[in-house]
Amino acid sequence: MTYQLELEDASVRFDSLPVVRQVSLQLSQGDIGCLLGPSGCGKTTLLRAIAGFEPLHNGRIALQGKTVSSERVMVAPERRRVGMVFQDFALFPHLSIADNIGFGLRDRSAGERRQRIRDLLKLVGLTGQEKQHPHQLSGGQQQRVALARAMAPRPEILLLDEPFSALDPELRTQLAAEVRTLLKEDGITAILVTHDQSEAFAMADHTGVMNQGQLHQWDSSYNLYHHPATTFVADFIGRGTLFPIQVADRNSIDTPFGLLSGKLPPPLEPGDKLQLLIRPDDLHLTTKPEGIQARIIEQLFQGADFLYTLQLEDGNRFQCLAPSHQRHQTGDRVTLKLDIQDLVLFGGDGLALESRS
Amino acid sequence: MPGRNQRITAALLPWRVSIVTTTLLLALPVLVVVSYGLLPAGEVWRHLADTVLADYVSNSLLLMLEVATGTLLIGVSTAWLTTMCRFPGRALFEWALLLPMAMPAYIIAYTYTGMFDVAGPVQSALREWLDLSYGDYWFPEIRSLGGAGIMLSLTLYPYVYLLSRAAFLEQSVCVLEVSRTLGNGPWQTFFRVALPLARPAVVAGLSLALMETLADYGTVQYFGIGTFTTGIFRTWFGMDDSAAAAQLSTTLLLFVFTLVLLERWSRRRMRYHHSSQRHQSLPGFVLRGHQKMGAILICSGALFFGFLLPAGQLLFWAIETRNMIDSSFLQLTLNTVGLAAGTALLALLLALLMGYGKRLIPERLTSASVRIAGMGYAVPGTVIAVGVMLPLAWIDNSLDSLMREHFGISTGLLLSGTLIALVFAYLVRFLAVSLQTVEAGLGKIRQTIDESARSLGARPGEVLTRIHLPMLKGSLLTALLLVFVDVMKELPATLVLRPFNFNTLAVRAFELASDERLMDSSSAALAIVLAGIIPVILLSRSIRHSRAQHDLST
């Protein structure tokens, strides 16, 4: 099948410095993708390469099966039919809201243009404000105008560069969900760049985690959390602790919590050293006497739940999530029960082992 | 991010070449002058060095000292009062204090001479009232070094006012409030916190005022004070020694260069002096009683003596001598306006070429070129005149002798003594003004604006016509107006380079005043002052705009 967006070993260099290294991913029609990573990981550069503002050093970018960037091909941004929403919105200050939205509709007839502007204003909930200028709108409204402007010419793909970072944190998740609904209503394929995982979770069907120019994993949010492909993803997405462990026999591993059994991938030998990921929601506080003994050394009240930091007898520390009515004091001794569905194990190279039970 | 993309920059070669060529052309006058400065000293130079050079240096230094004291006192105090204190009339003073900028120093000098000279109305009234005759009493001599210092301070303090005001506005209120909580009163807070924080801006404004002081010719010539600019004129026309004039110019350039370095250095330091990003509304000390009267007195004093009094006098004279406004005066105005408008347009085109070039090709070569092209504002008009005259006269003479040798025709003066030479000199001096405005306008258009237009299907040319030009409209108009007014006011370069029998308003006003026909010169002077109000209006509009933003951010 033809993907709406396809990247094959895409690499970007600034002078001789590699910024994006051999990224490959595919996005189907109507899907929303996300590039997630810490600042400086190359995610914005990759987005700009898709838009046509950065040339590729290696590899290929194709929109609807047509190559738009490669070592030899470089289609100009205005001929790619991409829509882009910038971090600072970049609204044209000298044009009214309606003219901003209509900017990319030059080749349509006047009636068609008016109709499209009216539809989009309605879609983003700004009907009646078309005569106003960008500086008269609030940040959230400006953001929606930028979105409507980018959607107006019905682009092949919509690119959003940290679209919510200029807004108040309280607004972000709510707006992300709203924007997702808008895009889905119009059936628009989109790709978004962010460093905020809650935005990615709220918007994206597929998320790619990037670090130092490399794409570590291109997957659903659920899999990023529960089946991270590398220790970087495990660490970057959600909370968790990596414990050094040893393989005991073919079906069990020796951990600070005692022997854990599960299906291990075949090439492992007893005595192999690995790392095990424990998420705060893999453990429960229990009132039963038998279980893992630990002491509470820190507590963080988060409303619906407590995040306790616990310490084992051997000094290992980890975190545990408990409902907020399970209230304990710092220094209390508690008993824990492990509730792990899949053992998430990493080899010495930081890559996950296939160990899904 | 352009510049990284080799394919884009390679295509801009013609652009790069034209930027560098323009810069070289504009730098030519200064280069010529400096190269003369390196020649071995001639007879006249040695004579100058033995006799008047020490006077020129000491007079220039003294004048600078006076202007520094005067502009600092007036500029900083009024800036502090209008930004930090609340008193009746503050909103009016805020922009009206800029009005003296409209008054060229040489014009204020004639006006004050006319009013306060022995034969002027003030002294006559005094004599009549006290029944004294000339010589019986002491009255400050207006045509003196001290008088020149006062005249220049009254017209140049707005530079200090503008920059210190901006610095005070940008200061974090929290810093001032911390000082208050630590036990400093308002006065102590001003001297221990606010003023040190604003110092780089104050120094930058002061160095601009001092550059203007060094460049002044009209005032010192009229007052008969020997400084570099008058010395250059005397050497050039009186002793007919171009080399010595060029060498004097080089010495003057050394002074100017020091000031340029001072200005650059303090502007660089300004960046580190913002301790906080958040701007709260300024405290606004409400003044009462004596303080209130004092504030009003200081501000209205600066405004009265810097603008209202001389402008009123000019208006009065112009009405008295309204028969001076005849067809030749109209011709004069037409000459001036045409010359100023043409130069402004050329300067704008060049500024667009350079400003855009710098945006498209952010390389060291282009940005250095643009920076050099923008240095002309520091070079005194007299020096530019010498620097333009020398090479053009050389070209004319060589061409003439060549043609005479081969064809027996005398071509005469093709370039020197024509409008080309004059406009060229104006461009050297005033390109900086339009360049700065255009660059500031372009700087406000973020790269993402260009990119979002591109991603919406606009070709690069369309980005220019649909985005940049409409967004820049205001800046372009401002650039035109500022250069227009500067050309109208310019005196020394015009005096030297104007074609035979071609006069401008500034030259006419100067000639009439020098012939002691002060009242007759007033209509020309008033026309210049009226034109000079345009940039004041523009500036005060931008001030009001910045204040609106300032209030919004709270």
Image: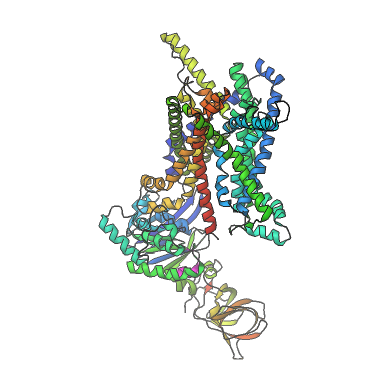
Whole-percent x, y for residue A46 in the image: 45, 57
Q: Is residue B398 visible?
A: yes
A130 lies left or right of B92: left
Q: Which residues are magenta?
A: A194-201
Rendered position, B72 above or below A299: above
Q: Residue furthest bottom?
A: A288
Whole-percent x, y for residue B172 in the image: 62, 57
Frontmost residue, A114 versus A291: A114
* Main SS, magenta residues: helix
B41 lies left or right of B12: right
Q: Residue at x 51, y 25 (%)?
A: B508
Rendered position, B97 above or below A152: above
Whole-percent x, y for residue B325 in the image: 46, 28
Q: What is the quadrant of residue B63 in the picture?
A: top right
Frontmost residue, A72 versus A135: A135
Q: Quadrant of the N terminus of chain A?
A: bottom left
